[in-house]
């Protein structure tokens, strides 16, 4: 819970956020700042790569909830990819697979933004 | 093992260090450590969020044997708030119909096998139990 970072990459028009470490009530503000940065840069097609995310609590999930409606209203979305099983379990227990596209790989997530899959 | 912590979200860093030591001391596997961190963080942050003006520190204690992990959180200067009776989160609701809050308590109830709440003379005591899988 004490170490967390967000890395930025892009693939075409898709902004990829690489989450690493533990996302908790103390570190959630860093994810919030990263998403806000995307919005300022008008990058609303966002993929979260969770392959190195080892822990998430409700505070981390709350960040996704806080921004998703605004991003969708602006024509974008947040797709979530490559979650570790324990982390996916937290998303699942709160019914997030019903609210977000959660897929196995980053490639699949980027593909969801292709016009034919949007 | 137990330790007192101040009533501020920045204390989470120290709490994580404490829970790391607890996990090492008791030899917890990654699954049990995940549950321990989750339960403590969710309840501690709720205590801070809903009772930030309390005067005293919050006590976090952990006991463990081969069959169970037991977590205690004690707030010595608090208002009553029965976590066990909080309204269930509707996980099937649409984004638009979701009500804020309650996600952390929902997770604690799902991850833990027992959640016991006691309140007396401004003292809130929460005892959580997780039964551990054994290879026997």
Image (cartoon, coloured by chain):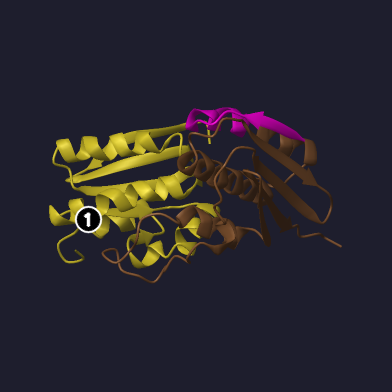
Chain colours: A yellow, B brown
User: Residue at position x 60%, y 44% from top?
Assistant: B40
Q: Residue furthest toward the right? A: B136
Q: What chain letter is assigned to the residue under label 1? A: A
Q: Which quadrant of the figure contains the C terminus of chain B?
A: bottom right
Is residue B23 found left or right of A100 in the rendered image? Answer: right
Is residue B25 found left or right of A49 in the rendered image? Answer: right
Using the rendered image of the protein, determine whether residue A97 is visible from the camera's viewpoint: yes
As rendered, which of B43 and A34 lies closer to the eye? B43
User: Residue at position x 18%, y 47% from top?
Assistant: A44
In the image, is residue A90 above or below residue B60? below
Q: Which residue is mark 1?
A: A69
| Image location of residue A101, percent across then percent down | 32, 61
In the image, is residue A6 above or below residue B115? above
As rendered, which of B118 and B26 lies closer to the eye? B118
Q: Which quadrant of the figure contains the N terminus of chain B?
A: top right
| Image location of residue B93, percent across then percent down | 35, 70
| Image location of residue B27, percent across then percent down | 77, 42
| Image location of residue B5, percent across then percent down | 62, 30
Location of residue B17 (image quadrant): top right
Query: How many marks are shown on the rendered structure?
Result: 1
Q: Residue furthest toward the bottom? A: B92
Is residue A111 found left or right of B75 in the rendered image? Answer: left
Which secondary structure, mark 1?
helix
User: Residue at position x 18%, y 56% from top?
Assistant: A72
User: Which stretch appears magenta?
Assistant: B1-17
Is residue B130 found left or right of A94 in the rendered image? Answer: right
As rendered, which of B35 and A101 lies closer to the eye? B35
As rendered, which of B84 and A86 lies closer to the eye? B84
Whether residue A109 is in magenta: the answer is no
In the image, is residue A114 above or below residue B38? below
């Amino acid at each position: 819970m004490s170490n967390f970072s967000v890395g930025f990459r892009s693939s075409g028009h898709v902004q990829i956020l690489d989450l690493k470490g533990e996302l908790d009530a103390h570190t959630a503000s860093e994810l919030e700042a990263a998403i806000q940065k995307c919005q300022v840069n008008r990058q609303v097609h966002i993929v979260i790569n969770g392959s190195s995310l080892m822990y998430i609590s409700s505070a981390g999930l709350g960040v996704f909830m806080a921004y998703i409606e605004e991003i969708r209203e602006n024509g974008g979305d947040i797709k979530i990819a490559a979650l570790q099983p324990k982390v996916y379990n937290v998303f699942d227990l709160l019914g997030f697979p019903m609210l977000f596209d959660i897929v196995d790989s980053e490639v699949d997530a980027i593909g969801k933004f292709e016009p034919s899959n949007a | 093992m137990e330790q007192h912590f101040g009533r501020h979200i920045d204390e989470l860093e120290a709490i994580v260090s404490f829970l790391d030591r607890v996990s090492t001391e008791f030899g917890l596997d990654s699954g049990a450590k995940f549950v321990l961190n989750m339960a403590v963080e969710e309840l501690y942050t709720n205590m801070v969020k809903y009772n930030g003006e309390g005067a005293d520190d919050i006590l976090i204690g952990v006991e463990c044997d081969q069959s169970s992990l037991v977590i205690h959180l004690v707030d010595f200067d608090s208002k009553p708030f029965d976590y066990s009776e909080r309204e269930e989160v509707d996980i099937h609701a649409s984004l638009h119909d979701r009500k804020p809050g309650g996600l952390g308590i929902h997770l604690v109830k799902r991850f833990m096998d027992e959640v016991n709440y006691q309140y007396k003379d401004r003292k809130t005591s929460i005892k959580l139990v997780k039964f551990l899988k054994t290879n026997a």
